[in-house]
Image (cartoon, rainbow, N blue to C red):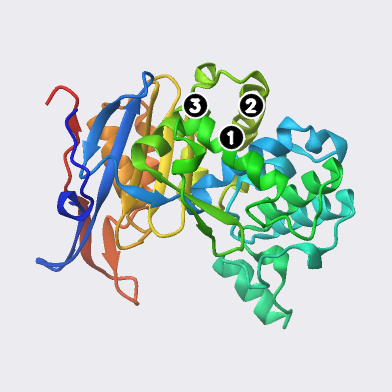
Amino acid sequence: MQVEKGNRKMQRILVEEYRGKVLECTHAGHICGVDDTGSIRYAAGNPLHMTYLRSAAKPFQAIPVLQHGIEKLYGFTGKETAVIAGSHRGEPFHIAAIESMLHKSGICEESLLCASTYPLNADARDDVLRHDRPKRRVYHNCSGKHSGILALCKGGGYDIVSYCDPGHPVQRQILRTLASLSEVPEADIPIGTDGCGFPVFALPLDGLARAYLKLACSDLIVDAPIRSAVEKLTALMSEHSEMIAGTDFICSVLLRDANIVAKGGAKGVYCFGLKNERLAFALKVLDGSEEEWPLIVASILEQIDYTNRATIDDLYRISQVKISNDANRIVGYSKAVFDLTTDQE
């Protein structure tokens, strides 16, 4: 596939929003799909667009935890191990799992460097406020990741105070893992600071898609310890899909389909791999919106003739196909408007 290297001039309108019969909003972005040769198979916009992974990095950040057997060392359950790769919404079962992890590993909540906040789930947040309870670090949607990495630091004998420093041994291992799976050299991966304080990595969409392809198709991973950790992690993500996001959130919906490995990140980045089809996609909504994810992913799956219609229907169910006003009256609609180009075009 011939691709240009410019980002903005290649952007495509992915979703249109109508209020009544008038086009009110558009959401532009880029999509890249790769096959099991690592080649770009599908695209909309610029498949080489550079983007920070944000929380789409969490499965890769969790891999070293399983490589070192930390979940066995501290007796983490499957749910507790899965939430390390999750962006949980602060529902009671999420908080119970993280509190249990901290208790088992002997780590205090104050050691987490993510900010104290309220749960993202509306019902959970309302319950906290109704009972006049304070903000907590475990409510932060990255607290599962922080708890897992702190357990790795403690179990591996690494410093736990500087665990968010890009030069920390665990962070260096995470970077090496991501570089290996994405096939992007470490030196070519820019590093910033994420909202939770962790290092955040940037990759071109094709590299990000290749990394997710290997999560779905672990036979493509050369390194045996990484491959074993990926197989354990992705199995837990599917088995405990509710721990990766929350009730009726896109990640949990997609992961209920055993053929899919998926995770999103802040500011509009979303990724998923398909095991049987041996394909993976990475996309970026340029205005940073997340509401369009289910509609975009549903359209991608339809365009590649994905056979599990139930998954597509589930995505439409949670999407903003119908736009409602504050009184829950339908006043408009959204639709995906992009066409994937292929390597044959």
**Residue found 54% across the figure and 61% down from its top:** 193
Spot occupied by residue 227 in the image (x, y as percentages of width and height)? 61, 23
Asked whether the viewer can see residue 63, the reply is yes
Q: Nearer the viewer, mark 1 or mark 2?
A: 1
**Label 3 crowd bin: few (<14), some (14–19), many (20+), radius 10 Å:** many
* Residue in the foreground of this view, choosing between 204 and 290: 204
The residue wearing badge 1 is 177
Q: CA distance from mark 2 to mark 3?
A: 10 Å
* Residue in the foreground of this view, choosing between 340 and 46: 46
**Residue found 62% across the figure and 53% down from its top:** 166
Kind of residue at disc 3: Lys
Spot occupied by residue 307 in the image (x, y as percentages of width and height)? 33, 24
Q: Earlier in the sequence, mark 3 or mark 1?
A: 1
**Residue found 72% across the figure and 39% down from its top:** 65
The residue wearing badge 2 is 226
Q: CA distance from mark 3 to mark 1?
A: 12 Å
Q: Which mark is residue 214?
A: 3
Spot occupied by residue 29 in the image (x, y as percentages of width and height)? 25, 52
Mark 1 and 2 residues: CB-CB less than 8 Å, in contact?
yes
| Mark 3, secondary structure of its residue | helix
Whether residue 104 is situated above or below residue 192 in the rendered picture: above
Whether residue 16 is situated above or below residue 313 in the rendered picture: below
Kind of residue at disc 2: Ile
Q: Is residue 246 left or right of residue 81?
A: left
Kind of residue at disc 1: Thr
